[in-house]
Image: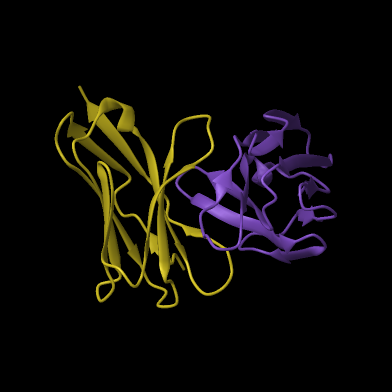
Protein backbone atom coordinates (compact mmCIF):
# COMPACT_ATOMS: atom_id res chain seq x y z
CA UNK A 1 0.00 0.00 0.00
CA UNK A 2 1.82 3.05 -1.28
CA UNK A 3 1.03 6.02 0.94
CA UNK A 4 3.01 8.58 -1.06
CA UNK A 5 2.69 8.46 -4.82
CA UNK A 6 4.64 10.18 -7.53
CA UNK A 7 2.90 9.00 -10.64
CA UNK A 8 5.27 10.54 -13.16
CA UNK A 9 8.56 8.61 -13.32
CA UNK A 10 10.10 11.29 -15.50
CA UNK A 11 9.63 14.85 -16.71
CA UNK A 12 11.50 16.78 -19.38
CA UNK A 13 11.39 20.58 -19.67
CA UNK A 14 13.26 23.32 -21.48
CA UNK A 15 15.64 25.60 -19.66
CA UNK A 16 13.87 28.73 -18.44
CA UNK A 17 10.43 27.12 -18.38
CA UNK A 18 8.48 25.96 -15.35
CA UNK A 19 8.87 22.44 -13.95
CA UNK A 20 5.92 21.03 -12.02
CA UNK A 21 6.40 17.84 -10.05
CA UNK A 22 3.37 16.23 -8.45
CA UNK A 23 2.82 14.09 -5.39
CA UNK A 24 -0.29 12.48 -3.90
CA UNK A 25 -0.72 10.92 -0.48
CA UNK A 26 -3.33 8.70 1.07
CA UNK A 27 -2.59 8.82 4.80
CA UNK A 28 -4.67 11.52 6.50
CA UNK A 29 -2.26 11.51 9.45
CA UNK A 30 0.49 13.08 7.37
CA UNK A 31 0.94 16.70 8.39
CA UNK A 32 4.37 17.63 7.11
CA UNK A 33 5.74 17.24 3.61
CA UNK A 34 9.22 17.55 2.19
CA UNK A 35 10.90 17.52 -1.19
CA UNK A 36 14.35 16.06 -1.65
CA UNK A 37 16.64 16.30 -4.63
CA UNK A 38 19.04 13.51 -5.52
CA UNK A 39 21.94 13.47 -7.94
CA UNK A 40 23.45 10.13 -9.07
CA UNK A 41 25.87 8.58 -6.57
CA UNK A 42 24.94 11.13 -3.90
CA UNK A 43 22.59 11.13 -0.95
CA UNK A 44 19.27 12.99 -1.11
CA UNK A 45 19.44 16.63 -0.11
CA UNK A 46 16.61 18.60 1.42
CA UNK A 47 15.00 21.14 -0.88
CA UNK A 48 11.85 22.57 0.66
CA UNK A 49 9.07 21.59 3.04
CA UNK A 50 5.55 22.57 4.00
CA UNK A 51 3.39 22.06 7.05
CA UNK A 52 -0.26 21.14 6.71
CA UNK A 53 -1.24 24.46 8.30
CA UNK A 54 -0.02 26.20 5.14
CA UNK A 55 -0.96 25.86 1.52
CA UNK A 56 2.16 27.40 0.01
CA UNK A 57 5.81 27.76 0.83
CA UNK A 58 8.35 29.54 -1.31
CA UNK A 59 12.14 29.51 -1.36
CA UNK A 60 13.76 31.28 -4.25
CA UNK A 61 12.96 29.44 -7.48
CA UNK A 62 11.18 26.66 -5.60
CA UNK A 63 7.56 26.75 -4.44
CA UNK A 64 5.58 23.94 -2.88
CA UNK A 65 1.78 23.97 -2.95
CA UNK A 66 -0.36 21.82 -0.70
CA UNK A 67 -4.01 20.94 -1.34
CA UNK A 68 -5.13 19.09 1.76
CA UNK A 69 -8.62 18.30 0.54
CA UNK A 70 -7.20 16.61 -2.54
CA UNK A 71 -4.25 15.12 -0.62
CA UNK A 72 -2.00 16.55 -3.28
CA UNK A 73 1.15 18.62 -3.32
CA UNK A 74 3.27 19.97 -6.10
CA UNK A 75 6.73 21.44 -6.48
CA UNK A 76 7.18 24.30 -8.93
CA UNK A 77 10.62 25.27 -10.18
CA UNK A 78 10.78 28.59 -12.01
CA UNK A 79 12.84 29.15 -14.03
CA UNK A 80 14.22 25.66 -14.55
CA UNK A 81 17.97 25.31 -15.01
CA UNK A 82 20.07 22.42 -16.36
CA UNK A 83 21.56 22.00 -12.87
CA UNK A 84 18.09 21.14 -11.62
CA UNK A 85 18.27 17.86 -13.52
CA UNK A 86 17.98 15.20 -10.79
CA UNK A 87 15.56 12.79 -9.18
CA UNK A 88 13.05 14.52 -6.93
CA UNK A 89 11.49 12.66 -4.03
CA UNK A 90 8.36 13.68 -2.20
CA UNK A 91 8.27 12.63 1.47
CA UNK A 92 5.66 12.83 4.21
CA UNK A 93 5.61 12.67 7.98
CA UNK A 94 2.84 12.47 10.54
CA UNK A 95 2.66 12.80 14.30
CA UNK A 96 5.49 13.28 16.77
CA UNK A 97 7.89 10.81 15.19
CA UNK A 98 10.56 11.54 12.61
CA UNK A 99 9.84 8.75 10.16
CA UNK A 100 9.60 9.81 6.55
CA UNK A 101 7.57 7.98 3.92
CA UNK A 102 8.92 8.55 0.43
CA UNK A 103 7.45 8.41 -3.01
CA UNK A 104 9.22 6.58 -5.82
CA UNK A 105 10.70 9.75 -7.26
CA UNK A 106 10.50 11.71 -10.50
CA UNK A 107 13.50 12.14 -12.78
CA UNK A 108 13.59 15.75 -13.97
CA UNK A 109 15.63 16.57 -17.05
CA UNK A 110 16.10 20.22 -17.94
CA UNK A 111 17.31 20.63 -21.50
CA UNK A 112 19.51 23.60 -22.44
CA UNK B 1 31.48 19.80 9.37
CA UNK B 2 31.28 16.23 8.04
CA UNK B 3 27.52 15.74 8.59
CA UNK B 4 26.50 12.10 8.06
CA UNK B 5 29.33 9.76 7.06
CA UNK B 6 28.76 6.27 5.69
CA UNK B 7 31.37 3.59 5.15
CA UNK B 8 32.09 1.76 2.97
CA UNK B 9 30.87 3.43 -0.23
CA UNK B 10 30.85 0.15 -2.16
CA UNK B 11 30.74 -3.48 -1.06
CA UNK B 12 30.35 -6.86 -2.74
CA UNK B 13 29.29 -9.77 -0.56
CA UNK B 14 28.69 -13.42 -1.18
CA UNK B 15 25.38 -14.92 -0.19
CA UNK B 16 25.47 -15.88 3.47
CA UNK B 17 28.25 -13.50 4.46
CA UNK B 18 27.74 -10.94 7.18
CA UNK B 19 28.82 -7.34 7.33
CA UNK B 20 28.19 -4.05 9.06
CA UNK B 21 27.44 -0.78 7.32
CA UNK B 22 28.76 2.09 9.36
CA UNK B 23 27.03 5.42 9.89
CA UNK B 24 28.28 8.32 11.98
CA UNK B 25 26.98 11.85 12.42
CA UNK B 26 28.66 14.80 14.11
CA UNK B 27 25.63 17.06 14.46
CA UNK B 28 24.44 15.68 17.82
CA UNK B 29 21.14 14.63 16.24
CA UNK B 30 18.86 12.45 18.34
CA UNK B 31 17.13 10.69 15.49
CA UNK B 32 18.90 8.36 13.04
CA UNK B 33 17.54 6.03 10.42
CA UNK B 34 18.47 3.63 7.65
CA UNK B 35 16.81 3.52 4.25
CA UNK B 36 17.32 1.39 1.20
CA UNK B 37 16.77 2.59 -2.33
CA UNK B 38 15.85 0.15 -5.06
CA UNK B 39 15.05 0.95 -8.70
CA UNK B 40 11.47 2.17 -9.02
CA UNK B 41 10.86 1.81 -5.26
CA UNK B 42 11.92 5.10 -3.75
CA UNK B 43 13.48 5.05 -0.29
CA UNK B 44 12.12 2.59 2.23
CA UNK B 45 12.76 2.78 5.96
CA UNK B 46 14.61 -0.20 7.43
CA UNK B 47 15.23 0.73 11.08
CA UNK B 48 15.35 3.92 13.08
CA UNK B 49 16.46 5.19 16.46
CA UNK B 50 15.15 8.09 18.53
CA UNK B 51 18.17 8.15 20.81
CA UNK B 52 21.00 6.10 22.27
CA UNK B 53 19.73 2.72 23.39
CA UNK B 54 16.40 3.01 21.56
CA UNK B 55 15.72 1.42 18.17
CA UNK B 56 12.64 0.34 16.28
CA UNK B 57 11.65 -1.30 13.02
CA UNK B 58 10.68 0.51 9.89
CA UNK B 59 8.92 -0.70 6.77
CA UNK B 60 11.43 -3.38 5.64
CA UNK B 61 13.38 -4.59 8.72
CA UNK B 62 13.78 -8.29 7.92
CA UNK B 63 17.38 -9.44 7.54
CA UNK B 64 18.83 -6.39 9.28
CA UNK B 65 19.85 -5.58 12.84
CA UNK B 66 20.73 -2.26 14.39
CA UNK B 67 21.96 -0.90 17.70
CA UNK B 68 22.58 2.59 19.01
CA UNK B 69 25.13 2.69 21.80
CA UNK B 70 26.11 6.33 21.23
CA UNK B 71 24.39 9.40 19.83
CA UNK B 72 26.90 9.56 16.98
CA UNK B 73 26.85 6.02 15.58
CA UNK B 74 24.11 3.85 14.12
CA UNK B 75 25.51 0.72 12.41
CA UNK B 76 23.38 -1.56 10.24
CA UNK B 77 24.18 -5.27 10.36
CA UNK B 78 23.42 -7.88 7.75
CA UNK B 79 23.71 -11.24 9.50
CA UNK B 80 23.41 -13.46 6.42
CA UNK B 81 23.39 -11.52 3.17
CA UNK B 82 20.91 -12.45 0.44
CA UNK B 83 20.75 -11.28 -3.19
CA UNK B 84 17.49 -9.49 -2.32
CA UNK B 85 19.56 -7.16 -0.14
CA UNK B 86 21.41 -5.81 -3.15
CA UNK B 87 20.59 -2.13 -2.92
CA UNK B 88 21.85 1.35 -2.12
CA UNK B 89 21.68 2.08 1.59
CA UNK B 90 21.32 5.54 3.04
CA UNK B 91 21.76 6.62 6.62
CA UNK B 92 20.05 9.81 7.80
CA UNK B 93 19.84 11.90 10.94
CA UNK B 94 17.59 14.66 12.20
CA UNK B 95 17.06 16.63 15.39
CA UNK B 96 14.02 17.48 17.42
CA UNK B 97 12.26 20.58 16.17
CA UNK B 98 12.57 19.70 12.52
CA UNK B 99 11.43 16.82 10.39
CA UNK B 100 14.21 17.45 7.88
CA UNK B 101 16.56 14.48 7.54
CA UNK B 102 20.20 14.85 6.56
CA UNK B 103 21.46 11.98 4.45
CA UNK B 104 24.83 10.35 4.00
CA UNK B 105 26.36 9.64 0.60
CA UNK B 106 25.14 6.07 0.53
CA UNK B 107 26.61 2.55 0.43
CA UNK B 108 26.12 0.55 -2.72
CA UNK B 109 25.89 -3.12 -1.73
CA UNK B 110 25.88 -6.04 -4.14
CA UNK B 111 25.19 -9.56 -2.91
CA UNK B 112 26.17 -12.31 -5.34
Depth check, front residue: A7 or B25 = B25
Instruction: Identify the residue at the far top of this view.
Output: A112
Q: In the figure, what tint was chain B given?
A: purple
Q: Is residue A15 above or below residue B77?
A: above
Count of labels shown?
Answer: 0
Q: Residue at x 67, y 29 (%)?
A: B9
Q: Position of residue B30 (x, y in %)?
A: 69, 58
Give me the chain that's yellow.
A
Residue A74, visible in the rendered structure? yes
Give the left or right position of residue B46, taking residue A59 as reference: right
Q: Residue at x 64, y 34 (%)?
A: B1
Depth check, front residue: B32 or B7 = B32
Q: Position of residue A108 (x, y in %)?
A: 30, 37
In terms of image quadrants, where is residue A83? top left
Q: For the C terminus of chain A, give its image quadrant.
A: top left
Q: Position of residue A77 (x, y in %)?
A: 24, 42
In terms of image quadrants, where is residue A32? bottom left
Q: Residue at x 65, y 35 (%)?
A: B107
Give the left or right position of residue B81, taking residue A43 as reference: right
Q: What colouring style does the render use?
A: by chain
Residue B112, visible in the rendered structure? no
Q: Position of residue A87 (x, y in %)?
A: 39, 39
Amino acid sequence: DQQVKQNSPSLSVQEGRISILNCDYTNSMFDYFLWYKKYPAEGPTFLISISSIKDKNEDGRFTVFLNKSAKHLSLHIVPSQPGDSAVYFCAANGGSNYKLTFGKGTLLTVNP
Amino acid sequence: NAGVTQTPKFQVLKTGQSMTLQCAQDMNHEYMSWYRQDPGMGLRLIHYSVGAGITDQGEVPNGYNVSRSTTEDFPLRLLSAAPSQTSVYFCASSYSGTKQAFFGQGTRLTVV
